[in-house]
Structures are given as structure tokens and as C-alpha cells.
Image (spheres, rainbow, N blue to C red):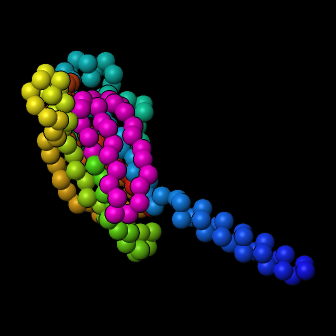
Amino acid sequence: MRTVARILLTTLAAVLAFSSVSLAKDVTVEVTSIAAATVPAEELSRSGGPVIDAKIKAFAPKLQSLFAYNSYSFLGLARSETEFGDAVRLELPEHFVLEVRPERFEKDGIGRIEMMVTLMKDLRTEVAAGRGQPREEIILRTKIRLENGGTVLLGGPPISGGVLILALSARG
């Protein structure tokens, strides 16, 4: 009887462990929205150099090496989980939407996540003014191969007060 109970408990534990794994999402996607701008030299002299929001200090070296701006401000953070093959839509500031579709995981060392990334402008302001159906304008569509847990910076479109830069991370 004890042997049967032990087998049942072991089987139940294995089923529960398997079901919790199968319910978990495969990929966590995170995007930090950053406003980049060039401010007048007199403002920089007061601060002693480039102005970088404390919330995005971790990105400072990459931002300064890739972009020719001297002011970077945190606009927001969006995070979601999805499965490989399924797209996730992340709402960004100023009516932008980022759609990320993780396509596959390449196991080489720590691994790489290949994903299709589409940045769109939500034109709902035109709809609100009574000028037609909701639609989105595609700004950028690209395939990215990102180191698992890594971050890529994408220079984006103009926004009020500068340019939108996206720090996209994915972990599988």
C-alpha cells in the first residue's frame, strides 16, 4: 500500500511540475522608451556634461556611443510575456506601438532569441477627429537576433521634444 501511495505521489508531483512548466510563457519582452534631444550648450555647462535621466543610467554608455544627442529622458517601461511564434503588442508614448514576435531560440552558448520587431504609429487621433477607421502606420519592421537577456537600442522617429529611442530586451 505504501508503495502504491509513493508512486501516486511521485506521479502527481511530476504532473504538477510539468503543468506549471507548460503554463509558463517562453519569452519576457521589455522595452524602455527614451526621449533623446540636443539641448543648448549653456544648459550642459550647468550640469557638467550630457543630461541622462537616473532611470536610464544603465544605458548611458551605449546611448552616448551610438547617438549624437546630449540629453536622454526616461519616458516609460512596458513589459510582457509571450510564447515563441506569438506576437505581443507594447503600448509606447505618443501613440506608438511596438509589436514583438519571438520566432526561435538559438542555443549557442547562452543563446540568442530571433524576433520580428515592428514599430507602428497608432493614428487614432485621426479617427477621433472623425476621419475614418482606426489604422496604424508601420515605421520600422526588422528581424533582430538578440543575445538572451541582452538589450538592443533602436533609434526611432521624431517625437515632441526630440527623438524616440527604444531599449528592447528579451529573455527566454
Pick whichever, 96 or 164, lies toward us: 96
Can you tell which quarter of the image residue 48 is in?
A: top left
Q: Measuring 40% from the left and 75% from the top, which residue is drawn there?
A: 108
Q: Measuring 38% from the left and 63% from the top, which residue is drawn there?
A: 84
Against 171, is 74 above or below? Answer: above
Q: Is residue 89 magenta?
A: yes
Q: Measuring 42% from the left and 47% from the top, which residue is drawn there?
A: 80
Horizontal side of 5 relative to 82 (left or right) equals: right
Against 17, is 123 above or below? Answer: above
Q: Position of residue 57 (x, y in %)?
A: 40, 37
The residues colored magenta run: 70-98
Q: Position of residue 144 (x, y in %)?
A: 26, 60
Q: Measuring 26% from the left and 58% from the top, which residue is drawn there?
A: 116
> Would residue 70 be visible to someone looking at this image?
no
Check the image and name the residue furthest to the left.
131
> Would residue 170 be visible to someone looking at this image?
yes
Q: In which quadrant of the rendered image does the N terminus lie?
A: bottom right
Dominant SS of magenta comes to: strand
